[in-house]
Amino acid sequence: MAVQSGELYFAVGAGDILGGTFQAANGTVLKFLNGGVLSGSFTAGFGADIGFDDGLFTEVPPVSFGGAGTVEFNGGTLMMQNEIIPNLQLTGGVINLPSDFQGGVITNLTVSGATLNGTNTVGGVLNLDGGASGPLAVASGGVLNWSGDLLPTA
């Protein structure tokens, strides 16, 4: 699917597969609403914006994000898998990590504006400009760079 001009708002269900190729041409907007299974290629041209804005989104590799524009998770809930998703900005909503994410300990993750949900341990570097919901432990040698919302209290 390609957006050549203007804006396109695409509403699917949480179980629907967003596979194949999605492109937003220079200066256009492509927004996904109501969730879906992310399993395709998403490319934003210069000045374009691809956003995942509402609902439950689940990552199922292979999925790729790129281009000169912006590709961002803005709202809803994102169920990530084992590694960070290159070129996807985590700017809003809720991020859920599985227990085996990056080997069971966060080693490299940047969350800017979203809320990190669940029980998580930082063994490498976590850049968190937003909030956390649930226990967040920093292991020996781990680094938490935090700004923004409140961190949970135990």
Image: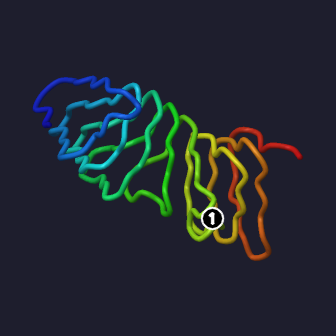
Label 1 crowd bin: few (<14), some (14–19), many (20+), radius 10 Å: many
Q: What residue is shown at x 64% (from left), y 51% (from top)? A: 128
Depth check, front residue: 27 or 3: 3
Question: As drawn, which residue projects farthest toward the left?
Answer: 4
148 relative position to 110: left or right: right
Quarter occupied by the N terminus: top left
Horizontal arrangement in the rendering, residue 8 relative to residue 89 (left or right): left
- On screen, residue 34 versus residue 141, left or right, reads left
Question: What's the residue at 37%, 35% (across, down)?
Answer: 36
Q: Position of residue 141 (x, y in %)?
A: 75, 76
Residue 106 placement: quadrant: bottom right
In the orientation shown, which residue stands out farthest toward the bottom?
A: 141
Q: Secondary structure at mark 1?
A: strand
Against 34, is 149 above or below? below
Q: Could you say where residue 146 lies in the image, as x and y percent from the top left?
A: 70, 52
Q: Residue at x 31, y 54 (%)?
A: 63
Give the residue pinned by disc 1: 106
Quadrant of the image occupied by residue 27: top left
Amino acid on which disc 1 is placed: Ile
Question: 11 and 45: which one is in front?
Answer: 11
